[in-house]
Image (tube, rainbow, N blue to C red):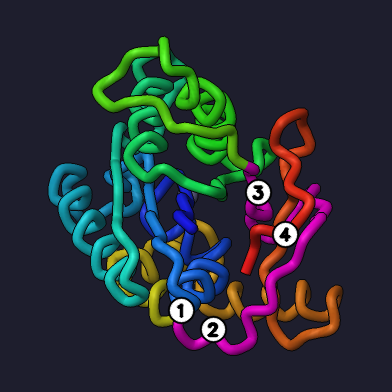
Amino acid sequence: MNILAVGAHPDDLEILCGGTLAKYAKRGDKVFMAHLCNGNMGGKDIAPEELADIRDREAKNSAAIIGAEALGPVAGDLDLYPTKEMRIAVVDIIRMAKPDVIITHSVNDYMPDHVITGRLVFDAAFTATLPLYKTKLPAHEKIMPIYYMETLAGFGFEPSHYVDITEFMAIKKKMLLAHESQYKWLSGHHQAEPVKMLEKVAGFRGVQCGVEYAEAFSMARVWGRISMESLLP
Ligand SMILES: [Zn+2]
């Protein structure tokens, strides 16, 4: 299968679904890791242009750990809006990856880039399948299921599916640690130590489903996107 995960910033996918992506990759699926925003606001001591370059490199390094392909970005941080231009950009990411399943942010997450990413991906996922909707790339052949990742720290999120990532916790952490520029920033500004947060959230989701560590998802429940078999690994 082709798997397309779309996060807002470099590091969101690692935090919210890195174990699941590693599990897909290990069983031989082709994994694309896209981020829509370039990460240029994720700090305070480095100029935005330089930071965007650093974070692009970090995203590629993280994707390389599981043999995934990094895609994006299409906008600066906090410069992502649900516009026609952005929808077309996301349509082309989908048409490029030809996914059998899409993973993206919940639309009730904690900040606008996450909310808008979830919205743009939902809207573009339908648009991408229309042959008469012309962009740089030809239409994707089918409507595919969408799984929403949980919100940061799980606020207001009710899972419909769980993935046992116990065997993939080490690689999930390694992927997150590839985002070297982010630890100091996140622990100072967001009052969160990212690796500890991973362990706690994945441990809590594991308690819910009877394994040591898990990641939680909610399938988009709309017509045309329901799969009878779970497409999660
Ligand atoms: Zn983010």
Left-right relation of 181 to 187 = left
| Count of numbered circles on the image | 4
Q: Are marks 3 and 4 in contact (CB under 8 Å)?
A: no
Callout 3, which amino acid?
Tyr
Marks 1 and 3: which is nearer the front?
Answer: 1
Q: Position of residue 68 (x, y in %)?
A: 34, 65
Name the foreground residue: 100 vs 109. Answer: 100
In the rendered image of this protein, does residue 144 appear above or below residue 15?
above
Q: Which mark is residue 168?
A: 2
Q: Tell me the crowding category of disc 4: few under 14, some 14 to 19, or many 20 or more residues within 10 angstroms, Cα based.
A: few
Helix, strand or loop at mark 2: helix
Q: Tell me the crowding category of disc 3: few under 14, some 14 to 19, or many 20 or more residues within 10 angstroms, Cα based.
A: many
Reading the image, the residue beneath label 4 is: 230
Residue under the image location 54 percent in, 83 percent down:
168
Which image quarter: residue 163? Answer: bottom right
Q: Quadrant of the C terminus?
A: bottom right
Label 3, label 2: how far apart the Cα atoms are:
19 Å
Q: Are marks 1 and 2 in contact (CB under 8 Å)?
A: yes
Label 1, label 4: how far apart the Cα atoms are:
17 Å
Q: Position of residue 119 (x, y in %)?
A: 58, 29
Q: Position of residue 81 (x, y in %)?
A: 44, 22
Reading the image, the residue beneath label 3 is: 147
Reading the image, the residue beneath label 1 is: 26
Callout 2, which amino acid?
Phe
